[in-house]
Image (spheres, coloured by chain):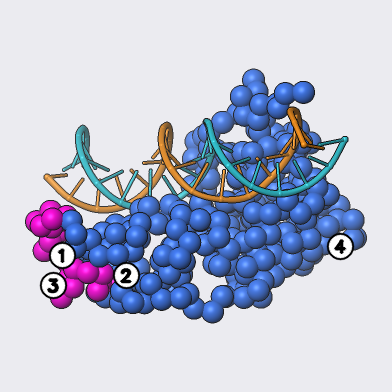
Chain colours: A blue, B cyan, C orange
Amino acid sequence: MGRQPCCDEVGVKKGPWTAEEDQKLVGFLLTHGHCCWRVVPKLAGLPRCGKSCRLRWTNYLRPDLKRGLLSDDEERLVIDLHAQLGNRWSKIAAQLPGRTDNEIKNHWNTHIRKKLLRMGIDPVTHLPLQQEPPAPLPPEQEQEEEPHQPQNGGELMQEGAGEDDITPMIQPHEIMAPPPPRPTAAASNCGSAVSSASAGSASVVSPSCSSSASASAASGVEATEWPEPMYLFGMGGIMDAGWGGLLFPSTGAGAGGGFGLGAVDPFDQYPGGGFDQDDHWM
DNA sequence: AAGAAAAACAACCGCGCTTCA
DNA sequence: CTGAAGCGCGGTTGTTTTTCT
């Protein structure tokens, strides 16, 4: 039997997820877990492919995700890990609790990579770009360059500081140095849990997944940093019920949609966002 | 204030690996 | 042992938002 197409099925929706779809997906996953992603959209009543659902959940809806810019420490860790691992974003993400490979990858491409280039560091090799003839940077950027060291002496600017205002935060040797102690075992499990959710078992939500969720609190992920969509379901309900119970309704805790769906207008639970005319979360 | 350009973010695509019948 | 099925990963693209002229 040939391999069934994943995303070319007719009727499979693509593009941005709506709040309603998010709600359906999270509601389903919290209640049933995911035995296999392929059937999730069918059972959840979503016109999406399983792959899309997995991506949405992993990168955006997971309760243990942090949102917002990477902290200086996280950025440094990403650079360290990238120097060792290369573009193995999932491995890097595994070391940063609450961060996804996609998020880190995007952050790298949009922020860190440019910073390194400005500092005269090859973002691929993490070595100085000195070989490059004259100056790889245009005149105006040359200006911004820290006068003292083109060879990676630069550093990551503080988040929030203008990109033009580069002040060294780490030294070359720091970039190449071994990474600091791994955040936490839970953190590692967190990342790997997600990436290996299917590898481990095909039954319900993998244990590692639940541990990642429950460990999120221990790893410093605060409720206020939970992904926006989680507010759709009422933070109180989630916190009260406990993720373990929610993810494992069979255990009793949180069974029966205890996460508060319908208790209140879920959209009112989110203090800072809203939906545009297309019903997209803003 | 309006338009253009750049930046940032979210999502998709396709390949490769692992598991299982 | 072989091949299908399922999933994760990394790269790329598309869309939205922000900044600049």
Please state which amino acid type lies under the numbered disc 2. Answer: Leu
Foreground mark, 4 or 3, reads 3
Q: Which residue is label 4 attached to?
A: A253
Point out the stretch of residues depicted in magenta: A133-155
Label 2: chain letter: A
Label 1: chain letter: A
Q: Is residue A157 visible?
A: yes
Identify the residue at the far bottom of this view. Answer: A181
Q: Residue at x 15, y 64 (%)?
A: A144
Disc number for residue A156: 2
**Residue A153 painted magenta:** yes
State how far apart marks 4 and 2 are (Cα). Answer: 45 Å
Foreground residue among A55 and A260: A55
- Going from N to C along the chain, the mark reached first, 1 or 2, is 1
The answer as to whether the residues below labels 4 and 1 share one chain is yes
Q: Is residue A53 above or below residue A235?
A: above
- Going from N to C along the chain, the mark reached first, 4 or 2, is 2
Label 4: chain letter: A
State how far apart marks 2 and 3 are (Cα). Answer: 15 Å
Q: Which residue is label 3 attached to?
A: A147
Q: Residue A86 at what x, y percent from top left?
A: 45, 58
- Going from N to C along the chain, the mark reached first, 4 or 1, is 1
Q: Are marks 1 and 2 in contact (CB under 8 Å)?
A: no
